[in-house]
Amino acid sequence: MVKNTKLAVWLEEIKELCQPDDFIICDGSDDEYNRMWDILIKSGVARQLDHDKRPNSYLVRSDPKDVARVESRTFICSEDEADAGPNNNWIPPDEMRKTLKGLFKGCMHGRTMYVIPFSMGPVGSPIAHIGVEITDSPYVVASMHVMTRIGKAVLEELGRDGEFVPCVHSVGLPLDDLDKDVPWPCNPDNLYISHFPDSREIWSFGSGYGGNALLGKKCFALRIASAMAHDEGWLAEHMLILKLTNPEGAVHYIAGAFPSACGKTNLAMLIPTIPDWKVEMVGDDICWMKFQQDGRLFAINPEAGIFGVAPGTGMASNANAMLSLHRDCIFTNVAETDDGDIWWEGMTEEPPDHLIDWNGNDWTPESGTLAAHPNARFTVSAAQCPVIADEWEDLAGVPISAILFGGRRATVVPLVNEAANWIQGAFFGSIISSEKTAAASGTIGELRRDPMAMLPFCGYNMADYWQHWVDISKMQHVQLPRIYYVNWFRKDADGKYIWPGFGENSRVLKWIFERCEGSADAVETPIGNLPTMDSLDLSGINLGQDEIAQLLSVEIDGWLSEIPLIEAYYTQYGDRVPQALRQELNSLRERLENAIPADG
Ligand code: SAT
Ligand code: MN
């Protein structure tokens, strides 16, 4: 069945290393998917939800020690430490290989080794790439069925000599160490999520959860793909992709990078408040972009599913996400209702009177604990989203007109700011930041930088990645998208959000759309191009003149005090920081200084 020579050799090698009892090449069929659930239900880790309420859907409870991506155990094993950069944990590749050989030796004793050929992107798309994940977790197999395109069609596409990214995953708990298997096997004390950007391999040991285990997502589609994109002249980004249609039926596609907790999924599925405008989703998390012959930048969503954070998602905050979840879903670490359905904080205003919480214990509103884990997830096919764009699986991808960078800033950063050109846009991307909230440790108001929302996902030195952004603009015959810095989170003197956000963000999208069309006005300011008061559609919104003025203000002093913070931030990347970005910073400072009134 395996025609690809490299794949056949590699499978034998890994089989010999991991010594599984059984060996299955996944075909991607419904039968196979259902078989995984039979196994998971029998093992006690999964339950089928009430079939009338939520057909063909499952609830899974992980080990409480294995509930999220673990950045401290994520490694970039480039030959040279400097190539991994201060943004990554580095272990020399030889040393890591030795460690991994030891850990993976016999690690699948008593288990089945599943081989998952998967395509990141529609099978056959010139923007797509293929990976093969080996795993001993049926939960990973089931999740990959939803999150990627897997099986026979991918093997066909791979052919005899096609290239693929090898991804090896084990929960790290061979059965011969145990009398009896546990429902959610894992090995949190020996966790390694390791990437070899030079040879383009992924090896992950000890966790079965999310991005640690579904290796197509952050490991391949961002960390390894960012290194590939760097070498091959394209972009692998942590961005949503949305389709925006105006009342006349004209369309622009917009990509957007936002750090976590900035409402990326909500924006991808937004319901506009302005009449007759339409937002549809192409992707909610990852975006691969390549230039086409005609010079335009085309994007695909490399994923096929949504792996969304459940808590906080409800009809009020994201109706389209809720409406995606009516059937064929996987829920992980949410709470279970007495009638065999699911619940999480924020799904409804009033919690049910009784639940089984994510740990499997009785729960009532008086319990004083969270019923769902804060990182509880829903896994669902993107095709089920009611506003999925028809062309979301087009092999050619969609042409990107604009790129957004967003952060969460109470002060200084205006609602929307258009970069004068690509380089200034890359500069904006490199400085996006969020204020720490009272909930996180550290000083309130202290900035956490997350350049291009890629800090945990850039598979090489962040400064080299910035240089790659700069170099993109020097490519021949390319039509570059416009770039915008947006901030929905400005607060007034009393600490209240000024901008209502959610569906009202469509007003900002409209301005960006009309800038792309050349029909909306902007004022040139020292920090970039801001909307004129008339060009931003604020009809019917309940905002006073001073509030609008605050949202669109150019705070000379505020920005001047940002300059040394940005400088200090760049310093950690030393002389690898692109000269072009340092120049942007310098000319920003000059423009700000010149804008100070002579008597001020
Ligand atoms: O757990 S994942 O990495 O897949 C998702 C996330 O980090 O948001
Ligand atoms: Mn993400």
Image (spheres, rainbow, N blue to C red):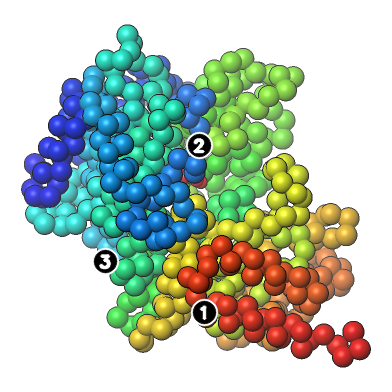
Which is more foreground, mark 2 or mark 3?
2
Q: Look at label 2 and name its amino acid.
A: Ala
Which is more foreground, mark 3 or mark 1?
1
Q: Is residue 102 left or right of residue 545?
A: left
CA gap between label 2 and label 3 equals: 32 Å
Q: Percent x, y for residue 588?
A: 67, 81
Q: Is residue 543 above or below residue 444?
A: below
Of callouts 3 and 1, the N-terminal one: 3
Q: Secondary structure at mark 1?
A: helix
Q: State the residue at coordinates (76%, 50%).
A: 444
Q: State the residue at coordinates (22%, 53%).
A: 164
Q: State the residue at coordinates (70%, 85%).
A: 590
Residue 579's disc is: 1
- For the C terminus, the quadrant is bottom right
Q: Percent x, y for residue 231?
A: 32, 68
Disc 2 packing (10 Å; few <14; some 14–19; many ≥20)? some
Asked if the residue at label 2 sits under 8 Å from ligand 1, the reply is yes
- For the N terminus, the quadrant is top left
Residue 494's disc is: none
Q: Percent x, y for residue 47?
A: 43, 21
Q: Look at label 1 and name its amino acid.
A: Gln
Q: Which residue is mark 3?
A: 126
